[in-house]
Amino acid sequence: MNALDVVAPQLALLVTAGILLVLEAMLPGKRRWLPYVALMGLAVSAAWTTSWVIRDDYQTIFDGTFSLDQYSVFFYYVFAGITALVVLSSIDWVNTAGRGKSEYYALLLVSTAGLMFLAGARDLITIFVALELSSIPQYILAGWAKDRRSSEAGLKYLILGAISSAILLYGMTLLFGFTGETVLPEIGAALAADDGANRALIVVAMTMIIAGFGFKLAIVPFQMWVPDVYQGAPTPITAYLSVGSKAAAFAVVIRVFFEAFGADFVSNDWANIFAVLAAITMTLGNVLALVQTNIKRMLGYSSVAQAGTILIGLAAVSASGQEFTLAANAVLFFLAAYAFTNLGAFAAIIAITHRIGSDEIADFAGMWRRAPILAAVLAFCLVSLTGIPPTAGFWAKLYVFYAGVQADLVWLVVIGVLNTTISAFYYLGVVRHMFLGEAEEMSPVRVSPGIGVSVAVTAAGVLIIGVFPGPVLDAANEAVQVFAGG
Amino acid sequence: MPFFLADVLEVGVPTIDEWVVWAILASPIVSWALIALYLRKIPAVAGYVTIAAVGLSAVLSVIVLFNVMDADGGTVVFTHEWFTAGSLEVNFGARIDGLSAIMLVVVTSVSFLVQIFSQGYMEGDKGYGRYYAHMSLFTASMLGLVLADNLFMLFVFWELVGLCSYLLIGFWFHKPSAAAAAKKAFIVTRIGDLGLLAAVLLIWAEGGTFQIDEIHQLALTGALSSTVITWFTLGLFAGAAGKSAQFPLHVWLPDAMEGPTPVSALIHAATMVAAGVYLMGRFFPVLELTTDAQGVVAWIGALTALIAATIAVVQTDFKRVLAYSTISQLGYMMLALGVFGYVAALFHLMTHAFFKALLFLGSGSVNHATNTFDMRKMGGLRTAMPFTFWTFVIGSLSLAGIFPLAGFWSKDEILHDAWDENLALWAIAAFVAFLTAFYMFRAVFLTFFGEYKGGEPVDHHDEESHFHGDPAHPHESGWVMRLPLIILAVPAIAAGWVNMAGMTDWFGRMVAGALPEPELHAVSFDWWIAGSSTVIALAGIGTAWAIYYRGVIASSTLRDAFYPLAAIFENKYFLDRLYEDFFARTVLQRWWNRLLELIDVYIVDGIVNGAGTVSRGLSSRLGVLQNGQVQAYGLGLVVGVVILVAAVFTANPL
């Protein structure tokens, strides 16, 4: 049963999801323990992943369509961590929302299992199935709240997600039609053997694949859904979308590029495309974030801008050819740092909005007096998103910029740095409201244990990575070395 | 190299225990943590904890200084791997040498006295505990910046200094002016920080190291190309220009007066603004290799000195005179760095730290008695506040450069270096010296002589005001404020004696010992420079005396005579207007908003409407959705793919 052992981290989540559904049906009571069952499932998954790290016996299964390697393991941890924090942050919200508690957590776990499959998938069909496995629960969760906005968000996300899946699938079929292969390295081999006659077709295929994932990455011009969905979806789900599915999409894009397209296609031309996309994405995201008055919309545009920053890393990956590991390392580190930071910000926002019933930035005025710790953590995370030391976000940006400089993309780095300055205005604008504004009401904001743990863990994470980025950088470096051999 | 008379120095290695060095940094951090976590609600203790912590740092800094003196300013580095990842190695280390040892003593001693003074000045303020927490962190950040043995660590502490200054300038955040000033300081200095960040990235890419001594070696051995050196230096200077308030980034410093006065004293003397000059001093071995960058540094410095001095002449706010004076003197230091005056610049940095701290605390003492900083409401305070008066005069004489006070020696050395290098720069510096003497004594005469004009009545409705006395009957401040003034008066008089041209060279040897190739450019005493600068300073004081004490000619008459110039000075060369009204309001807000509006109306709405028409039929069936946006988005996705494919083909000729 070797294959089952390999996919055990995912299976643990799927089984837990099943247990949740069954248990809720069988056991009476208020079922306050449901989130903890979900957390246990995540813990088992992470523990199993760790057992693979200890065994150091990475392998490829299912005829090469799925790989358990250092790269996927890195993302397993990221996803398990993200989902655990989202579960903790969800407890209050789910208790208030009232309906189908077990389904909520079960869907979250299923989606996470999908993300984990994505991290290890090396085959077009596996990638597609994994993507849908992660996406369909997300569509449902985005529409989970009973209000109109949430339903609208869920439906929009579903329809647009379906269109983007279609585009992705079209790209994949083109690639399959040309090479006759679905496994990435074999596609790579077939492409290498090509004499260039079909290059146009391949370029179209690649572009469509990028476009399909561009939807999840939330890069321009595939970002339009972001503000509506981010604002409408339940806030914990917004947090999940902003870091989880984004990280998974980047994980797949990097793997597809290395394993299927290889050094031949990873060239300056692609670097330029990514670079231009990065510049536009960053600038548009930041500029539109500037004018937002709703904090969830603002973070939506901010996540677009951050995706643009990550694209600098991707451009650097393409531009550096064989020397790509530095840039890929930067991207992975950025994703991990961004996950902590954004989740921290969202956890604080969830607690605050849950109490004040509004997600308008103006209503955060004077929050410092009502909830000093939440305000401080939110401010700290916003500082990290801006990229000021000593925070994880600072290193993330610095490392990506450095990769850009090394890849001779100085102009892009300059745009990136300028964008960082623009972003300071809206990130610190929230801080200003919270610390310098006057609150209309002074009642303190209570912090529930779940959010409390979530806020504490993320704040500590942002700070610890900010002061000692070494271990995470090392882990990211080890992960990308997987591609260095081939 | 213009280093004639260069003495090659033999330096040793200081034998200091490592824990002493780290304790200097740790002490205020511990005090910060204690106050932030436990003592915020017990203000009385918070003050004493900070004073004790900074005092301990000061004592340890003196021990370090003695050890370094034994080694003639030589260098010892205690460095530890902070983390390594791939090709990147970052250390957390302390570099102790003549330069950093002296800076440590200056920072900790000035900070120590400021903390004591604050006990009196901040008494009864609601945010007393918070104040001391910020002050501890501010001091710690500056110490970390001074100790840093690598550019990276320096950058991190540099940003922390900026963050703390934001918190302290905006300390009374209920005042809109304070909140605005804090924001301005943060944004303007961050513009400079972009340059520093660029320098960090550049040296990482080109040199592969952040260690200061390794960067020096790379530059000296020619491993870095001259272009890289020039851009690296200019990047550093951009950062330094932000922090050290050089034209055109100086605009934040005068507004930073909105913070509590002891904070101003600390910012202006020993911490924030010193950071920029210190940074340039640290990288002087690189700076002196690039004449292009040196020229920029020298001329920006000279321009800053001149502009700020002319503005200071027309200020009516006591603290603003001092603020522009700081900018002007920082310009002096930058000028010195640009004309090979490494020792002179750092020497002036040190003497200035003492007399400017004294002057600021003096202004705080005056404010404590009169409840105002408006010199037009003061006058005659000489008799009511003798301690404040005499110490303030000492500080002013020192700043004006009167023999044999501290400022005389350091300023003369700068004039000397400028004279050797470039006569135009010397002429500007000499003129600025005249203006300096003039505006300082204008302030002295307006404040301490003549009739007392009543101060500012206390507004008893203002709950935030913590003013206790009676402005109508000003009285000398208590001992807790008097003592720091008296103590600071001593170095304001004597700090210059450690490097008297042609006589003593202790300071020069110490800071030159910190260079990778220690050699001292000995300055001989030059009667012409010393004589002319004394005459210039006396002329400035005399002019102030004639106008503001004897009233030979009314200042308003003078103002009318020089109307266009006076208007320019009074409006600070219209720079604030340019930045705030034009750039911030017109360009950024109005034009930018207009642009966004246009995009919104013509592009976004256009697409949405167009798509809406196309798919209205579908839309009515999916009634949940608004305005056909989903169709527009879907269309956008498809259009995006088409654009992307087109772009790929354009970029990727087949």
Image (cartoon, rainbow, N blue to C red):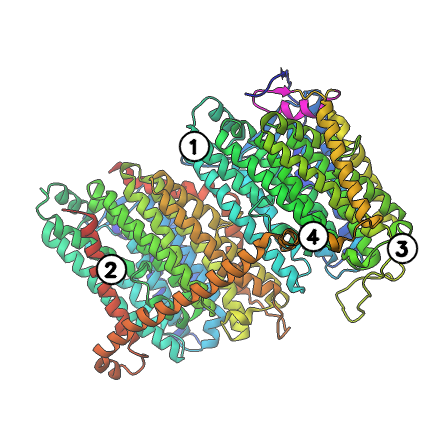
Q: Which residues are magenta?
A: B503-521
Q: Nearer the viewer, mark 3 or mark 4?
A: 4
Q: Is residue B406 visible?
A: yes
- Secondary element under disc 4, as helix, strand or loop, is helix
Q: Name the mark on residue B126.
A: none
Which image quadrant for residue B29?
top right
Looking at numbered disc 2 in the image, what kind of residue is underneath it?
Gly
**Mark 3 vs 1, N-terminal side:** 1
Q: Is residue B569 shown above or below B62?
A: below
Residue A110 image position (x, y, % from top left): 33, 63
Instruction: Provide the residue designation for mark 4.
Output: B561
Instruction: Provide the residue designation for mark 1.
Output: B228
Is disc 4 surrounded by few (<14), some (14 to 19) or many (20+) residues within 10 Å?
Answer: few
Instruction: Provide the residue designation for mark 3.
Output: B475
Residue A195 left/right relative to A208 = left
**Mark 1 vs 4, N-terminal side:** 1
Instruction: Provide the residue designation for mark 2.
Output: A212
